[in-house]
Structures are given as structure tokens and as C-alpha cells.
Image (tube, rainbow, N blue to C red):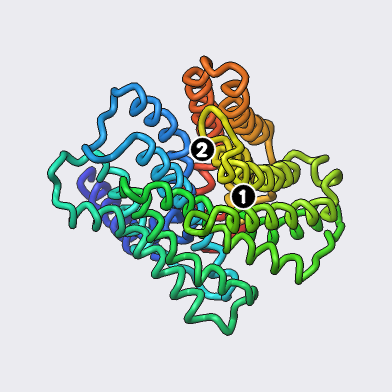
Amino acid sequence: MRFKVCYKTAIQLIRQQSDVNPAKAPPSFFRQPVWLVGFRPFFILGIVSGALLPLLWLLVLSGHLVLRSGLTPQQWHAHEMFYGFGWAVLGGFLLTATKNWVKIRGFHGPVLFVLAALWLADRLAFLLPSGFPAALLFALHSAFMLLMLALLLWTLVAHRKNDSYPENWLFILALPLFLLSKNLLLSEQYFELGWTMTLGLFRLAVVIMLERTLSQFMRAAFGVDIPRNRRLDAAIRLGALAAVFAGVLPVYVAVVVLAATATLLLVRFFFWKPLQGLSRLDIGVMYAGYLSLVAGLFLECLRLAGKLDTVGNVSAHVFTLLCMGLIIPAMLVRISLGHTGRKILFTGSDKSAILICGAAGLVRIVPPQIWPASYQACILLSALGWTICYALIGWRLAPFLLGPRVDGKEH
């Protein structure tokens, strides 16, 4: 009797398993939500690197983390903050945005996995022993950018007729320059040119992003339309593009280009209802980032003219820490919520993270100019601030980035 009961139970279980609807079965590895849209894996990598890279920078500065010979700590720091952290965020944004611009299904599945693996290989290549073949080092450092740029350019070029933004020719022109500037940055001889080009390319990306998003944010938050002038917008974009090449222009020409671009940006700022925008933190940080972009350009003019005597590179850090540093955490929250079907709502922890990141930037820039002896302590405090910011952001967003959309859509 017991045997018959056990036999019937076993048969029922087998039948139940065989009748499982394949659509309800657990998805395969590459069908997991994290591999369905570009922003998901790369925002995770951006959050992790935003939290860890500042701590690794402290270890490099203190000599506890040794890089391969022939590479200075400053080269590694600049490269990793731009092409590690920065391109994880920018890559995730562009993989998601470009598909929306040209109205296609974006890259997903194995392609995103390969991109993520190549991004990681780029980071680990710095720990390889001295004497490693130069050709292999070049391949490890370039593979991620080559594939990422190829995918983005193919999306923009192949579907150019469907592009919602005619001015995306700027991306088609500028994106390949990232690979050049990345390798110049890793060269001891051309490091200065590499980081100034990199800085200029990220400025250009921020200029375009602010132009496209602030109009949407102000309309959604306050129901107002900020005035737009096509000629002014075009002049600003062209100025930002020309500023990419400031390192190879005659100094007086570079100063004129940077100053003119900053002035045009500032003029436009005052027409974009800044007092209303600054009244809300989630929108206000975009306006604060905008002003930091302008300030960084004016400070760079002074640096190139030899009129800026500061502790540390203030003009670069005003842009990276106070412009990118404020805009990126807010962008991560906004995109991660909106593109997973959730209502865009900044919680107390989100706002705290953004404020901590902004404070970390101010600590890194301001006190050392008054008390030079505090420079190392300020670097430590700033690094800890970034780590706290991205730990808070990661704790909140990781479940959304790893899980399915809440509105039932696949991607």
C-alpha cells in the first residue's frame, strides 16, 4: 500500500514538472533582467567603481597598491576615474539612450556580458607584472572601448534616418576620439594632451545631456518650458567640441574658445529659470552641475594663461567632482527608476548621497587652497565621501537593476 502511494506521488510530481509552462520557467543566464538593457550592468559597474576606485586611489597614493612600472599614480587615477567609472556610466547611458533616439531594440544578452568582461579586463590590466608584452597590454586596455564605440557608432550611423536628434553627428564625430585620448593618457609623453582631450570630451557629453534633459525635467516637475534658441545651442555645442582640442591649439586661441563657450553657457543659464530649478534638490543638482561646468571652463582659461596658482588641479576637479559628481548620482537614480517602470522619486538616502558627494567635492577643492597642509587629509575625506555616496546609491538601486521591470514589460 505504501509503495503504491509513493509510486502515485512520484508520477504526479513528474507530470507536474513536465507540464510547467516554459514561459514561467526561470530564465537562462543571458535572459536575466541585468542583461536585457545596457544601463543595467554598466550602472552596476559604475556604482561599484564609484565606491571602490577612490579607496584604491588612497592605497596607490600610500604605496600599498603597486601598479606596473612605467605608469604614474596620476595616470592611473585619471584613467580609471574617466575610463573606468566615467565610461561605465556614460556607456550605460549611451547604450540605452541611442536605442531610444533611433527607435530600435538595443544591444542585450551576450553582447552586454562581453562588454562587461572587457571593462573588467581593462581594470585588471594595471596589476599585470612588468615586462608584459606591450601588444597584449594595448589589447586589454583597448578592447572594451573598441567594441563599445563600434556598437554605439553602428547604432547611430546605420539608423541615422530614424534619429530624433540631427545633432547626433557630434557623437559620431567625437566618440572615436575617446579611444585616441585614452591611449594618449596612458602615454607618459602625451599624458597632458590625453587628459585635456578626455576632459573636453566629457564636457561635450555633459553639454549635450544637459541640453536634452533639463527641458524635460522642468516640464515634468513644474509644467514650464525653458526657452530654447537653436543658434545659441548650436554655438555652445560647437564651442564645447572645439574645446576638446584646447591642448593642441595656441594658448590664446584655446583661452578664447573656452571663455566664449563658458560665457554662452552662462548667458543661457539665466534664461533657463534657475531659481525655480534650484528649488528642488533632484532638479537643482543639475543646475548646480551646469554652473560647475561653467566655472570649470573659466578656471581652465586661467590655468592655460598661467594665472591660476592652486594646490592640485582645481579647474579639472571643479568639473569632475562638482559637475559630474553632482549630476551622475542623480542621473543613476532617475534612469534606474524610470527605465524599470518605477515612479521617479528621490528618497532621503538618495538626497543624502548626492549631498555627501557634493560636499566631498568641495572638501577636495576648497580647504587646500586656504590650508595647503590639509591637502592629503582632504583627499582622504573626499574619497570617503564618494565611497559613502555610491554605497548608499548602490544599496537602493541594485535590486532594481538586477530585477525585472515592475510594469510587466520585458525591457
Q: Can residue 337 be seen here?
A: yes
Residue 123 rendering spot, x and y as whole percentages: 32, 44
In this view, 124 is above or below 117 = above
Q: Tell me the crowding category of disc 2: few under 14, some 14 to 19, or many 20 or more residues within 10 angstroms, Cα based.
A: many
148 displayed left or right of 351: left
Q: Tell me the residue at 44%/42% (across/down).
A: 81
Q: Can residue 406 be seen here?
A: no
Residue 161 rendering spot, x and y as whole percentages: 58, 84
Residue 194 rendering spot, x and y as whole percentages: 41, 52
Q: Which mark is residue 337?
A: 1
Residue tagged by mark 2?
394
Q: Tell me the residue at 31%/58% (across/down).
A: 142
**Number of marks:** 2
Q: Give the quarter of the figure containing the N terminus.
A: top left
N-term mark: 2 or 1: 1
> Which kind of residue does numbered mark 2 sit on?
Gly
Question: Marks 2 and 1, Cα distance to the nearest angstrom?
Answer: 13 Å
Q: Tell me the crowding category of disc 1: few under 14, some 14 to 19, or many 20 or more residues within 10 angstroms, Cα based.
A: many
Q: Tell me the residue at 58%/75% (across/down).
A: 103
Residue 265 rendering spot, x and y as whole percentages: 73, 55
